[in-house]
Image (tube, rainbow, N blue to C red):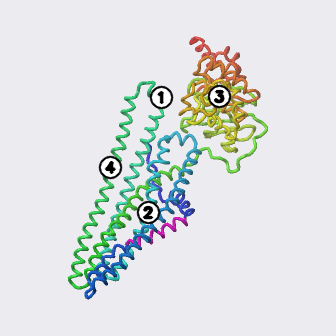
Amino acid sequence: MTPEPPPRPSRAFRRYVQPLLWANRWPILLALVLVGISGGAAAMQNVFPKWLFSHVLQPAGLDLSERWWRLGQLVLIYLFLTAVLRMLFWHWGFRLFTRAREHIVFELRRRFFRHVNHLCLRFHGEHTSGELFSYLFGSPLRAVLDFFHHTTMNVPGSVVAVVSTMAVFLVWDRVLAAVLFATALFSVIMMLRARRRMQRIQSDFQAVEGWVSGRVADLLRGNKAVKLHAMEAQVARRFEEEADAIREKSYRRDVLSHVEWIKQEGLGYVCYAVLMAACTWRYLSGGIDLGVVAACLAAFAGLSGPIQGIFQSFALWGGAEAALARIGAVLDTETTTPDPRDARGEWPEGREIVFAGVTFGYDASRPVLADFSLRIPPGEKLALVGPSGAGKTTVTQLLLRLYDPQAGSIAIGGADLRSFSTAALRRYFGVVPQDPFFFNTTLRDNLRVARPEASDREILAACGQANALEFIGALPAGLDTRLGEGGANLSGGQRQRLAIARALLSDPRCFIFDEATSALDTLSEKLISSAVERVLDGRTAIFIAHRLDTARRCDRILVMESGRIVQEGPYAVLAEQPGLFRDLVRSRELRD
């Protein structure tokens, strides 16, 4: 399981949430005022039995019409407090805060998504897509959302209701006011203790949820492999194990949370018993009348809701703290391939690619490339060959600046790659991977990934160069055809030709091909090979060659082993020299 990030909720709140609250301060402030007024109205509503007893029911010498007149006045005041100050103001406050809340949530999601997209492959290798998705739409952000929503919509009114009630009873009877104050104080103390426990409970649950979300998302993405290998039963058992882990953690979270609620409610029962005894003592001693007794008991019952609301806010803050710590840990993560502060806007005239003494390892203690040097003149067709793990893909990943070397430098036209923005750098290259990825949207949108402003005419021209027009014309909706998740509605050859067309649209100066024909039938291979030859005129091209036929057509071949160049030269020369390349050629001949 991934290690739990260190709790830094206060820093995360100050850095990421507080500025958003400040940007929406006016609607939030107005919402707080309206909800506060609503809470004051609720406090007055709670003590109405005092006036009912003292002004309508108890006074002697009043005839029936006078009592009904006083009752009518009291009812009108009561309805004004409940319908206007209580309900209408609360609803206005709710509307204002809900709009501000959704702006804040949108901005948090936007920042999180942009930041995660900007982070390097090292980060994405350590965090699954399912885990990151849970940050955006799962319990971490939901915990923050629930806390702010509940706190803004309930706590101001609850605090005003409690304070107003205390103030009223301080005028009527100080002893009862002291008892009410003591009950509120004990409740707050228990809330503070419960908040710390709730923070630990929520942090534990969210860590497990993020881990399980990533595992389950991986199972769903691998559905095709599951079917190919008849793994349905095995995967179902694995899912049940992951779901059971969530079930157990969810059970523990809710039970422990409920224990905290029971403690708080139990305190309320004890306080109510003490208040009944205090009211009886004060009434029998002549300190208060029945109106105050009725108002005190009604007020305590009425205050249980606001006090519970304040307690719930403390409990929710425990979850919000844990969530902010997790969200803040991601937002504080720095990319290992940062853009320069003053990025170059123009590419230099020279296009020679130079690796100078490059050392790099995915794990710094085990370098994949060590003191690696290489020069690629403009327009050269270069093949990288060698056994698996030799470092061929690593060379192209460094060139695309998906990683930065630990030592040495990589330059194009004499300019270090780190002097360019990563977006500008990657537009310099057109990449055709061995297994291209396509989004579950239209063919047109998938091709426009390389150049969003491309017209249909330009798209079709690129598809023509990539030998893709024939099958596009046969699709049910042409460019508007949806490709399915990962391009599931396309064959391997069709995906490769579309990947070439997508790369062509960006008009790159250099192509990188991760053997585009290694898993295709003969016809598809010929179509793609002819498309590749057509588009490479005058451009630099780097091939990660799994098939030696691809290397045969290149100007130069680099033979790599254990992160080093062990041979280089044209195909005809290397095939005759003793060494790894000749061994590869002969083993291929034996297989054929």
Q: Position of residue 68 (x, y in %)?
A: 31, 80
Disc 1 versus disc 4: distance between alpha carbons?
35 Å
Disc 2 versus disc 4: distance between alpha carbons?
25 Å
Quarter of the image containing the C terminus? top right
Q: Are marks 2 and 1 in contact (CB under 8 Å)?
A: no
Specify the label residue 144 is tagged with: none
Q: Amino acid at mark 1?
A: Lys
Q: Is residue 478 left or right of residue 214?
A: right
Q: Amino acid at mark 4?
A: Arg
Quarter of the image containing the N terminus? top left
Magenta-drawn stretch contains 39: yes
Which residue is label 3 attached to? 513
Q: Amino acid at mark 2?
A: Thr
Which residue is label 2 attached to? 151
Disc 3 versus disc 2: distance between alpha carbons?
55 Å
Which residue is label 1 attached to? 224
**Which comes sooner in the sequence, label 2 or label 1?**
2
Question: In this picture, is 110 found above or below 173?
Answer: above
Q: Residue furthest right?
A: 349
**Which comes sooner in the sequence, label 2 or label 4?**
2
Which residue is label 4 attached to? 252
Q: Amino acid at mark 3?
A: Phe
Query: What secondary structure predominates along the stretch shown in magenta?
Result: helix
